[in-house]
Image (cartoon, rainbow, N blue to C red):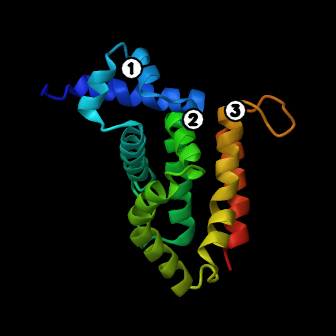
């Protein structure tokens, strides 16, 4: 059996993400990926058992990598405003610097892989963000609310702005580029909505 070539593994991962975003899970095949990588299909099976194994492994690797970016310089003991600002900064950086990966992860959200992929997200974020929310509630900075309601208010506007930016157009179809001014003015409104 041949040894794994690190450069080939990275090439396969990059091309797989590109192809998954371009053709979706249904249109994605190991043959198409091999052609895109200019390698034999047999080479892919050195790295992955099958298509599902490849999608799941790459998805989990990318979720872990993106999660690390989202938690950079985040301190669960900081004030609510400071912590939420750091989360916005990190999440914006994550999506803006990794648009294809972000789009692939969005596709995973509505696929048969979603339970496994988002369990990984939950494991990474549960402790630091749980502690952050608990601290903010204990200090009286915000009111207690269901996680889903909090997430929608805290991050829904951010992810919609990032989507508009990545698509290059606003709701009305006009050209759109996310600026710091737009980002942080939206953040101020979100912060005001969540604070007691």
Q: Position of residue 107 (x, y in %)?
A: 58, 44
Q: State the CA–CA distance, disc 3 to disc 2.
A: 22 Å
Farthest right residue in view: 172
Q: In the visual, does 183 lie left or right of 176?
A: left
Helix, strand, or loop for circle 3?
A: helix
Q: Position of residue 154 (x, y in %)?
A: 64, 63
- Quadrant of the frame with the N terminus: top left
Which numbered dot is residue 167?
A: 3
Q: Nearer the viewer, residue 101 or 183?
A: 101
Circle 1 is placed at which residue position?
34
Q: Nearer the viewer, mark 3 or mark 2?
A: 2
Q: In the visual, does 64 lie left or right of 170?
A: left
Circle 2 is placed at which residue position?
26
Q: Position of residue 11 (x, y in %)?
A: 34, 23
Q: Residues within 10 Å of mark 1 (few under 14, many from 20)?
A: some
Q: In the visual, does 144 lie left or right of 61?
A: right
């Amino acid at each position: 059996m041949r040894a794994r070539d690190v450069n080939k593994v990275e090439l396969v991962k990059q091309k797989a993400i590109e192809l998954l975003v371009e053709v979706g899970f249904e249109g994605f095949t190991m043959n198409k990926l091999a052609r895109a990588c200019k390698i034999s299909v047999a080479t892919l099976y050195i790295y992955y058992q099958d298509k599902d194994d490849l999608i799941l492994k790459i998805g989990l690797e990318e979720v872990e990598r993106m999660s690390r970016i989202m938690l950079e310089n985040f301190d669960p003991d900081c004030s609510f405003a400071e912590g939420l600002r750091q989360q916005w900064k990190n999440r914006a950086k994550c999506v803006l610097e990794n648009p294809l990966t972000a789009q692939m992860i969005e596709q995973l959200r509505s696929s048969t892989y979603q339970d496994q992929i988002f369990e990984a997200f939950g494991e990474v974020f549960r402790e630091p963000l749980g502690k952050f929310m608990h601290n903010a509630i204990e200090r009286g900075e915000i009111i207690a609310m269901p996680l889903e309601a909090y997430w929608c208010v805290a991050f829904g506007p951010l992810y919609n702005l990032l989507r508009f930016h990545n698509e290059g157009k606003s709701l009305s179809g006009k050209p759109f580029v996310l600026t710091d001014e737009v980002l942080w003015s939206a953040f101020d409104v979100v912060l005001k909505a969540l604070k007691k």
